[in-house]
Amino acid sequence: MKARLELHKPNSKAESPELRLRFLEALTPITHTPPDGQPLGSTIVEPRPGELLMRGRSDRKIKPWFHPLTLKSQYGKIIGEFLAERALETEKYGI
C-alpha cells in the first residue's frame, strides 16, 4: 500500500493540528484481520485508495486515525515543523 502523511489543521484554535494517513494505491491485495475476539471492522476500517485511514472507536463512531501534533506529544512539534516546511516546497517534493 502506498500512503502519505497529511497535516490536518482544525477549524478551531482550541484543537491542535493532527497528522493523518491517506492511502494512495494498493500494491497488493489487502486482507483485514481484526484482533482476536473483536468483530470485523471494530478497530481499523479496511483501507481504500484515496481515503484516510479510519478507525472505530468505543463510542461506535468511525473517525480518521490521527497523531496529535502538540507540544505535549513526543515528536509532535518536530513532525509538524517538518511537514510545514515541506509543504512550502511543493515543486521540489511534488506534494
Image: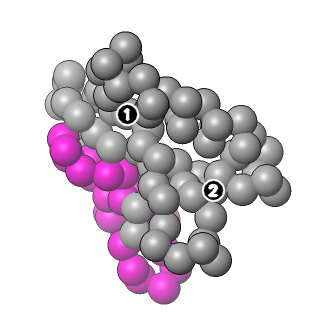
Is 43 included in the stretch rendered in magenta? Answer: yes
Label 1 SS: strand
Q: In the image as oriented, which residue stretches furthest toward the top?
A: 92
* Front in this rendered view, residue 51 or 76: 76
Q: Assign the magenta stretch its main secondary structure.
A: loop
Q: Tally the marks.
A: 2
Rate crowding at label 2 as few (under 14), some (14 to 19) or many (20 or more) other CA atoms within 10 Å: many
Which range of residues does the magenta coloring cover?
35-62
* Front in this rendered view, residue 78 or 52: 78
Report how far apart the C-alphas of labels 1 and 2 lie in the structure: 16 Å
- Circle 2: residue type: Pro
- Circle 1: residue type: Arg
Q: Which numbered dot is residue 68? A: 2
The C terminus: image quadrant: top left
Q: Residue at x 62, y 64 (%)?
A: 16
Residue 88 drawn above or below residue 55: above
Asked whether residue 45 appears in the rendered view, the answer is: yes
Residue 32 image position (x, y, % from top left): 30, 47
Q: Quadrant of residue 93?
A: top left
Q: Residue at x 33, y 43 (%)?
A: 22
* Front in this rendered view, residue 88 or 17: 88
Q: Residue at x 62, y 42 (%)?
A: 80
The reply to whether callout 1 and callout 2 are in contact (CB within 8 Å) is no
Q: Residue at x 46, y 73 (%)?
A: 11
Which numbered disc, 1 or 2, marks the residue that appears first in the sequence? 1
Residue 28 image position (x, y, % from top left): 20, 24
Q: Identify the residue position indicated by label 1 in the image.
A: 4
Residue 42 image position (x, y, % from top left): 40, 68
Asked whether residue 36 appears in the rendered view, the answer is: no
